[in-house]
Every structure is written in structure tokens, then in C-alpha cells.
Amino acid sequence: MNTMKILRTLLATTTLMFAATALMHAADVKVIANNSVAATSISASDLKDVFLLDKDSLAGNHVEPVLQNAGATHEAFIKEYLGKPNSVLQAFYRSQVFTGKASMPKVTAADTEMVAYVAKTKGAIGYISSSAASEGVKTLLVK
């Protein structure tokens, strides 16, 4: 009887740790948009659709996904919101380009470059570290 209680407690604790880890990764990333984008929030599903090129508008505005080249912020974003490893994501984009369905999204090297590009590009949506400065762009709340 005592062993069952310990196992249930262990299972509950493990589940809570996994949930907390997932929330921490989401909190590590801030989704940003050009000020021309009317939306102030975006569902996780719509965000995924924008970055997987299934959706090209939000709240009536044309949108364009912008990716970071690599790094912890990029990995956290694609894991949390796109559910694909980077190699699969890159293969997907290459196949879209090869078949003529889309062009390769703009890729930036760092948070500062991402903010600068999104600020000057109408409809651009990207992501940065939650601690990065984001002057000149709006932050979208992901629901």
C-alpha cells in the first residue's frame, strides 16, 4: 500500500516537472510582428500555420514568417510552436521552394537583426528571446 502511494506521488511530481519545463521553453521566446499587423495576439495553431506556410494573413493583413538561423531561441520556438526538428523544417522549406509553392523565408542571425528586419518589413512576424529588447515592433500574445 505504501509503495503505491509513493509511485503515485512520483508520477504526479514527474508530470508537473514536464509541464513546467514546457512552459519555461514557451516563456523563453517572444513572438514579434511589424506594427502593420493588426493582430495583438495569435493562437498557437495560427502561428504554426504562418510558419508552415499554410496561412499568409492575420486579421486581414498579409504576414511573412521570419526565422532565426540557429541557436537556443530558434530551437525553443520550433520545438514549442512548430513541433519539428530544424532539419525537417529546413527540408520542408526546400521542398516548397523546389516545387514553386513558396520562397524561402527570410533568416536572421540574432535577436537584434530579427527586430530590425521585422520593424522595417510590413507584415513580418518573427521571434526573439524573451529577454531581448523589442523596440519598434509589437509583441504578439500567443494563446
Image (cartoon, rainbow, N blue to C red):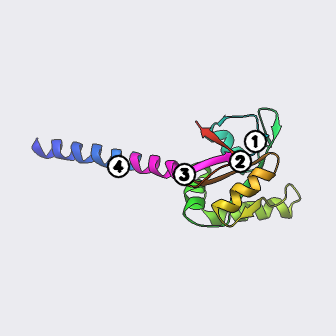
Type of amino acid at the residue the image marks with label 4 = Met
In this rendering, position of residue 123 left or right of residue 86: right
Q: Which residue is mark 1?
A: 35
- Answer whether labels 3 and 2 touch (C-beta < 8 Å): no
In this view, the residue in front, 85 or 124, is: 124
Q: Earlier in the sequence, mark 1 or mark 2?
A: 1
Residue 40: % across, % down:
67, 34
Residue drawn at the location 78% of the way across and 58% of the way down: 105
Gap in angstroms between the C-alphas marked 3 and 4: 21 Å
Residue drawn at the location 84% of the way across and 62% of the way down: 97
Looking at the picture, does residue 66 appear above or below residue 16?
below
Q: Nearer the viewer, mark 3 or mark 4?
A: 3
Q: Which residue is mark 2?
A: 136
Which residue range is magenta in the image? 20-33
Q: Which residue is mark 4?
A: 17
Q: Earlier in the sequence, mark 1 or mark 3?
A: 1
Q: Is residue 31 magenta?
A: yes
Residue drawn at the location 10% of the way across and 43% of the way down: 2
Type of amino acid at the residue the image marks with label 3 = Ser
Gap in angstroms between the C-alphas marked 1 and 3: 18 Å
Q: Looking at the image, how many numbered discs can be counted on the residues?
A: 4
> Judging from the image, what secondary structure is the residue with disc 3 in?
loop
Q: Is residue 62 magenta?
A: no
Image mark for residue 130: 3
Farthest residue in the right direction?
A: 100
Q: Nearer the viewer, mark 4 or mark 2?
A: 2
> Judging from the image, what secondary structure is the residue with disc 4 in?
helix
- Answer whether labels 1 and 2 touch (C-beta < 8 Å): yes
Gap in angstroms between the C-alphas marked 4 and 1: 37 Å
